[in-house]
Every structure is written in C-alpha cells, then in structure tokens.
Image (tube, rainbow, N blue to C red):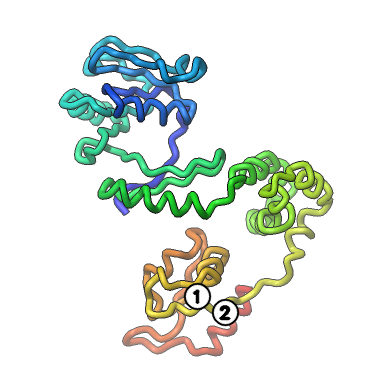
C-alpha cells in the first residue's frame, strides 16, 4: 500500500483549483459537494459557474493572477485539472511549499490521488488503486454502493449525536465498543435504517444502565474460522464477519498474511501452533489461551 487513505477537513482552509474546461468543472463540483471553499485559477480565463446553484457559487473565489506567484500561505491543497504544463509547474511549487497537490491522471506530479467515492452523508468510502486503474476503482465502488443500506449515513449521524453522552457514561473503551456494537447491530440500529429515528432515540434514551446493556450480550465466544486454501476471496461471509468482530485472533503458519489482513486493525494477533523448525505450544495450551481471551 503506497497511498494511505486519509480524510481532509476542507473547512480548515481554501483549496486551489488550477485548470479549465470540463475536467476542472468536474473537480469543482466534487469540491463543492464537500462544502469546500475554492480559489479557482482558470487557465483559459473563463470562470464558468452558470451550472452551480447560488449557494455553491458563493464558495468559489475567482483568481485572475498567476498561480505560480500567488500567495498560497493558507491553502490546504491544490488540484490541477486540464491545466497542461501550467499544472506541472504549479505541482513543483506546491511540493516545494509542502502543500498537498494532485495533478489529474498524473501520479508522478502528485502527492495525493483522488479515490472513487461512495457518499452516504456521514459514511464515506474511498476506493483507490494507487492511480493504476480508476476504472477498477469505479467498479469496486459500484459493488459497495449496491451493498450499503441507503440510510447508513443516518445511522452514523445518529451514533455521532449520542457519542459524547455515552462516552461520559462509559469511560472504558472496550465496554463502550461493546455498547455500540449492540446498538448498531440490534433493534436500535434497525430502526434508524428503516427510517424510524424517533423510535431509535426513544429506545436509546430508555437505557438507564449502559454497562449492563453492553454486557448483556453474554460471555465472550470463541469462533473457529477455516482459512481454506489461503485465498481471502474464498472466505465465507460468516468467516469475514468473525475476523472483523474479533478482539483477539489466534493463528498458525498455515494462515496467510492476506487472510490476517481481513481482521480488524486494532485486534490483537497471537501466533500459535507449530512453526517451522520450532516445537508447537500444544493444543491444551491453545485451548487455555482461547478460554482466557473469551
């Protein structure tokens, strides 16, 4: 993985757009959809915002000077689309100033790339291929679009509104995660996804003891997952869900790194079993570790 996916706060400062034509227009629409403030250097001198509504157009500042000499001191990112050689020169200046820059379809001149985006309000999924194939990224995005519930963003917003209140009542991180798993996966989450937000709020308000609610899921469980021939694409849906829900993953040398990469990023990973050239810890020891972890 060469490019680390990050989410840029576009309220932190203006974004500079350099370019012209439909390519620049497409980037402009994308930026404005994220509520960005845009400073646009139109390389053909035409700042066409006729297709934007008044609110969006008000966030576009027309820049008539030279982007190679303009003051960029408060700029958080620079985008070049349809800018030709000017884009290359702007990119070199941005690099020298330490400003993130993207030149459309030219990774060699860019310090970041644009992913294919799934936008569900507060739920945003970014799919990238390191700039190698935007078409592949779009196809993956289409599959994700088909999988996600229409109101998944509403569910994230619902949880966000309650986040501080629950955090103050549940300072323990692990217990708080259990609480939210029960909320998201249970009837409250189902209410939000079905458009019954008022019912969801009522049910969450009625939880007087969040610790007991979080713990009511029962004791910890141990799930045995078969890794098959080692191809992560052959994992069952249940196996993938178990890996992504697990707090601790025990594995041996027969489990490929690609399979382990499907586990939750913050899950503990414990190697067990026989390793090449070394004796194994024994099945009884493995059983004890599983019981202790559960």
Circle 1 packing at 10 Å, graded few (<14), some (14-19), many (20+), is some
Seen as rendered, the residue at the extreme top is: 64
Residue depicted at 37% across the width and 68% down the height: 258
Is residue 11 in sight in this rendering? no
Is residue 280 shown above or below 23? below
Q: Position of residue 153 (x, y in %)?
A: 59, 43
Q: Position of residue 203 (x, y in %)?
A: 80, 49
Neighbour tally class for label 2: few under 14, some 14-19, many 20 plus, Cα within 10 Å: some
- Residue at 47% over, 14% down: 58
Mark toward the viewer: 1 or 2: 1
Whichever of labels 1 and 2 marks the residue nearer the N terminus, that label is: 1
**How many labels, in total?**
2
Identify the mark at residue 250; answer none if there is no mark. 1
Q: Nearer the viewer, residue 274 or 185?
A: 185
Residue 96 image-quadrant placement? top left
| Mark 1 residue element | strand
Gap in Å between the C-alphas at discs 1 and 2?
A: 9 Å
Between 96 and 54, the one lying in front of the other is: 54
- Dot 1 and dot 2 residues touching (CB under 8 Å): yes
Q: Depth check: give the residue in front, 73 or 246.
A: 246
Residue named by callout 2? 289
Left-right relation of 126 to 19: right
Per the image, label 2 sits on a secondary structure element best described as helix
Residue 10: in sight, yes or no?
yes
Q: Residue at x 44, y 77 (%)?
A: 227
- Tell me which corner region of the image, top left, top right, bottom left or bottom right, holds residue 42: top left
């Amino acid at each position: 993985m060469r490019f680390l996916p990050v989410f840029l706060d576009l309220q932190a400062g203006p974004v500079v757009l350099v370019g012209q034509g439909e390519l620049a227009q497409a980037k402009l629409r994308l930026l404005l959809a994220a509520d960005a403030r845009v400073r646009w250097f139109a390389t053909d001198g035409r700042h066409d915002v006729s297709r934007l509504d008044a609110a969006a157009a008000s966030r576009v500042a027309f820049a008539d000077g030279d982007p190679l000499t303009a003051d960029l001191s408060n700029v958080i990112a620079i985008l070049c689309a349809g800018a030709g050689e000017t884009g290359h020169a702007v990119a070199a200046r941005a690099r020298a100033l330490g400003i993130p820059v993207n030149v459309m379809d030219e990774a060699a001149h860019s310090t970041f790339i644009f992913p294919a985006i799934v936008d569900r309000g507060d739920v945003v999924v970014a799919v990238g291929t390191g700039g190698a194939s935007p078409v592949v990224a779009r196809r993956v995005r289409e599959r994700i679009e088909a999988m996600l519930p229409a109101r998944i963003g509403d569910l994230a917003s619902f949880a966000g509104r309650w986040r501080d209140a629950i955090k103050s009542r549940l300072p323990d991180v692990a217990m708080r995660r259990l609480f939210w798993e029960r909320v998201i996966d249970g009837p409250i989450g189902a209410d939000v996804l079905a458009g019954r937000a008022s019912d969801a709020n009522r049910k969450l308000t009625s939880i007087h003891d969040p610790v007991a609610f979080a713990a009511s899921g029962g004791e910890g469980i141990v799930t045995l997952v078969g890794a098959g021939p080692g191809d992560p694409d052959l994992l069952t849906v249940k196996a993938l869900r178990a890996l992504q829900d697990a707090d601790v993953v025990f594995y041996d040398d027969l489990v490929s790194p690609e399979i382990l990469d499907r586990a939750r990023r913050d899950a503990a990973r414990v190697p067990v079993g026989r390793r090449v050239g070394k004796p194994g810890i024994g099945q009884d020891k493995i059983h004890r570790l599983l019981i202790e972890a559960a």
